[in-house]
């Protein structure tokens, strides 16, 4: 019996991949018939053990709701819930196991879940998350089993390629295997059955609905439903129901594949590093067997070097999205001319930002892989009227903006701290306005078994399709808490009457659908573990401990190194304006000002261009633009263009800040935007201001009276108390 994952590889604007740790290739796995299923609707939480049974030294004792949510989430790993596969030690994909409904989440696992599970177990073993549901010794034993099998599986050609594991592992078989194929080529059917019978069989498979043709009928996606398989060679397939033909058909359709995805391997690798960091802690470092366990984890990372080098595209300066090892073909899509186009990891505001940074740091790969990640920033007006500009996730998901965890010491960077806190402000503001008891993030929606990435805040989303705004999930509250503990604790307290309905004896459900006023009765391991790790807030400290042990901390500091103060009215930059289609535009540069005026505009722009061949370093700075405008400009775009090969730069996602100019009525106003500390801004050639299509045909009378980028000093950034500063709990 088969199942289809709801985590799908999506192709976004301009044919680019938009990725998520849980948005992966459609795969199918055999199901286990162990009969485990989810609890009933609105199942109340079981009574929790007394407070003395827990010890969360990194979570403030006065944060009652964060501690109670964390305590309930740790029920997920309770031994009686059998969450970890006894053979491999790997966590199952999730809780729901109901074959009658087509739910087989205890049949398989995926790499992000393995990595997060590894981290959670390491925290329990190290004593940073003491729980009555799993002892430190039990956690260490499961962790040891998991590490042993990771080392074994990364050398198994049925499961990995160049020591990078395939994305999904089937746990339903005696021997672990990769997932079932998700597509089939017509040539394989023709070769197997001959031209006449093969052609008839292909048409019958289409008519039966088992395959969905594409590429002019040369290939097809497999569609496995309850009516798929050995017992369902009926209707159009009745002529092919003899046992020999059935066996041959299913051998072709149900072959095993190895699909190596960069993002989830990076999630796993960075989790391995954080687990090592946890196992270097003072309470665990010298326990018997722990040094050997750390060595095995380090060997696991060492073996991955060749695989990551293979996934780096030197010509593009980016990582490939993934590699189909079965077909020996990079992931991609076919363009309108029938040419195969490979996909790259190319956008900064995504959950892989931290893990990709780790891969570059750990394996000494070119910093271009981070430098060439474009990004967008969008404004959002909070309830009290203050407008903030935040990094815009492609799909609008909270976990894309915050990450599954905040683990690459971003909180030590003043600009990143300010930007992450702004995201939390926006998420809380939007959820409070809409009475959402959680954040909008890729998840199950509560509509059947729908899982989608189209859940997010419309105002800060890059993708143009409508967003789902009524399915609030809990897991991103973990990462948010690690950024801004006090606001998240207040949010939890205000929403506790609804959140408490999601708590069960196996941890919290996914979230709550406000339209249906129903709990979303799904649990995935990656989400639940992410909630645990975020509330604990230990990830960044553990990563730092690991990097220190490897002498790599200075390399990470290079990624977040801030730039210098820049005045774009100084001799270091030239400034000019233009408009196209023969529209006359007047511009004048004065002492610290640049004035642009026209009665009617078509497609105007103002460019500040660095006179240095190396450009200007704007990384981690506060962009301050002062202006006077006689007319409102409802949409303006500030584009930051890098130095570089024009052919490469043209392929990158543009780095753009969306803003607007008000009618200042003769006064001066200022736009302030904190910029992320990232190497992509370290060599900026041009700062270009353009205007949206709504301005076409309208007048412009705009004076730029100042354009500076100033490094954000630690004292200027809003202070966030990270894990090290949290008051120890009981």
Image (tube, grey):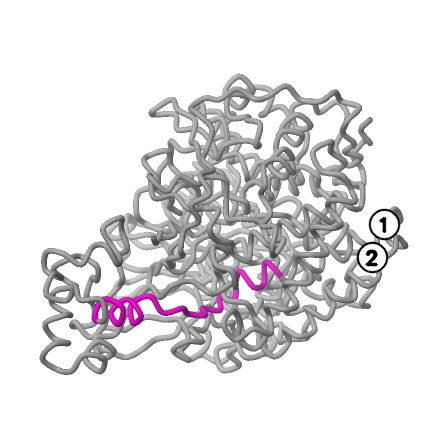
Q: Residues within 10 Å of mark 1 (few under 14, many from 20)?
A: some
Q: Position of residue 647 (x, y in %)?
A: 42, 80
Q: Quadrant of residue 162?
A: bottom right
Estimate the spatial distance between the alpha carbons at disc 2 and disc 1, rounded to whole Å. 7 Å
Q: Position of residue 111 (x, y in %)?
A: 55, 58
At horizontal 50% and vertical 40% (from top left) the residue drawn is 95
Rendered image: mark on residue 128: none
Q: Position of residue 8 (x, y in %)?
A: 38, 55
**Dominant secondary-structure state across the stretch colored magenta:** helix
Is residue 261 one of those drawn in magenta?
A: yes
Rendered image: mark on residue 284: 1
Q: Quadrant of residue 200?
A: bottom left
Relative to 272, is 194 above or below? below
Q: Which residues are magenta?
A: 245-268
Q: Is residue 548 left or right of residue 256?
A: right
Quickly name the residue at label 2. 290
Q: Position of residue 6 (x, y in %)?
A: 37, 49
Task: Specify which label sits upstream in the sequence, 2 or 1.
Answer: 1
Q: Nearer the viewer, residue 239 or 674?
A: 239
Q: Is residue 705 left or right of residue 488?
A: left
Q: Nearer the viewer, residue 110 or 12?
A: 110
Could you tell me which secondary element the residue under label 1 belongs to?
Answer: loop
Relative to 484, is 542 above or below? below
Screen quadrant of the C terminus: top right
Disc 2, disc 1: CB below 8 Å? yes
């Amino acid at each position: 019996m088969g199942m289809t994952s709801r985590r799908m590889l999506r192709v976004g604007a301009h044919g680019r991949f938009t990725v998520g740790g849980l948005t992966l290739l459609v795969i199918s796995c055999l199901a286990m018939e162990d009969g485990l299923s989810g609890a009933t609707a609105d199942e109340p939480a079981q009574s929790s053990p007394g407070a003395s049974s827990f010890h969360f030294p990194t979570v403030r004792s006065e944060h009652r709701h964060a501690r109670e949510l964390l305590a309930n989430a740790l029920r997920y790993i309770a031994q009686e819930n059998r969450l970890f596969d006894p053979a491999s030690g790997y966590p199952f994909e999730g809780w729901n196991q109901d074959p009658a409904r087509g739910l087989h989440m205890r049949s398989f696992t995926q790499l992000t879940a393995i990595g997060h599970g590894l981290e959670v177990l390491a925290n329990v073993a190290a004593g940073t998350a003491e729980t009555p549901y799993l002892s430190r010794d039990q956690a260490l034993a499961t962790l040891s089993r998991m590490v042993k099998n990771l080392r074994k599986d990364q050398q198994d050609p049925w499961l990995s390629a160049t020591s990078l594991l395939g994305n999904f592992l089937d746990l339903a078989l005696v021997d672990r295997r990769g997932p079932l194929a998700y597509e089939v080529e017509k040539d394989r059917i023709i070769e197997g059955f001959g031209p006449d019978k093969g052609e008839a069989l292909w048409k019958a498979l289409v008519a039966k609905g088992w395959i969905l043709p594409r590429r002019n009928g040369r290939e097809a996606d497999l569609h496995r439903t309850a009516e798929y398989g050995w017992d369902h060679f009926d209707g159009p397939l009745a002529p092919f129901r003899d046992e020999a033909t059935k066996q041959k058909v299913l051998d072709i359709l149900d072959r095993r594949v190895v699909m190596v995805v960069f993002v989830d391997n990076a999630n796993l690798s960075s989790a391995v590093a954080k687990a090592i960091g946890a196992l270097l802690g003072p309470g665990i470092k010298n326990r018997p067997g722990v040094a050997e366990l750390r060595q095995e984890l380090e060997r696991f990372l060492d073996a991955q070097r060749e695989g990551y080098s293979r996934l780096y595209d030197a010509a593009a300066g980016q990582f490939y999205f993934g590699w189909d090892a079965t077909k020996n073909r990079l992931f991609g899509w076919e363009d309108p001319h029938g040419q195969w186009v490979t996909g790259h990891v190319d956008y900064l505001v995504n959950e892989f930002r931290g893990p990709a940074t780790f891969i570059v740091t750990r394996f000494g790969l070119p910093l271009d892989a981070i430098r060439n990640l474009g990004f967008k920033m969008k404004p959002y007006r909070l309830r009290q009227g203050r407008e903030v500009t935040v990094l815009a996730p492609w799909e609008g998901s909270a976990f894309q903006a915050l990450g599954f965890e905040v683990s690459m010491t971003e909180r030590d960077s003043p600009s990143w701290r300010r930007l992450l806190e702004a995201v939390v402000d926006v998420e809380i503001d939007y959820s409070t306005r809409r009475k959402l008891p959680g954040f909008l993030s890729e998840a199950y929606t509560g509509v059947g078994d729908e899982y989608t990435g189209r859940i997010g805040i419309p105002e800060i989303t890059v993708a143009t399709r409508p967003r789902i705004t009524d399915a609030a999930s809990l897991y991103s509250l973990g990462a948010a808490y690690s950024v801004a503990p006090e606001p998240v604790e207040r949010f939890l307290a205000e929403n506790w009457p609804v959140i408490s309905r999601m708590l069960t004896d196996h941890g919290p459900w996914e979230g709550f659908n406000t339209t249906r006023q129903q709990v979303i009765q799904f649990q995935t391991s990656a989400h639940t573990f992410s909630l645990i790790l975020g509330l604990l807030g230990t990830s960044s400290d553990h990563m730092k401990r690991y990097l220190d042990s490897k002498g790599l901390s200075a390399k990470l500091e290079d990624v977040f190194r801030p730039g210098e103060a820049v005045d774009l009215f100084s001799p270091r930059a030239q400034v000019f304006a233009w408009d196209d289609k023969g529209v006359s535009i007047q511009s004048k540069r004065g002492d610290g000002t640049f004035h642009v005026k026209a009665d009617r505009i078509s497609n105007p722009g103002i460019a500040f261009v660095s006179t240095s061949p190396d450009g200007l370093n704007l990384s981690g700075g506060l962009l301050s633009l002062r202006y006077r405008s006689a007319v409102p400009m409802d949409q303006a775009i500030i584009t930051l263009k890098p130095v570089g090969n024009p052919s490469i730069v043209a392929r990158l996602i543009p780095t753009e800040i969306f803003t607007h100019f008000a009618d200042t009525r003769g006064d001066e106003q200022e736009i302030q935007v904190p910029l992320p500390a990232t190497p992509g801004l370290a060599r900026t050639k041009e700062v270009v201001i353009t205007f949206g299509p709504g301005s076409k045909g309208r007048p412009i009378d705009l004076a730029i009276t100042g354009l500076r980028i100033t490094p954000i000093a630690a004292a200027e950034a809003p202070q966030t108390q990270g894990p090290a500063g949290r008051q120890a709990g009981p």
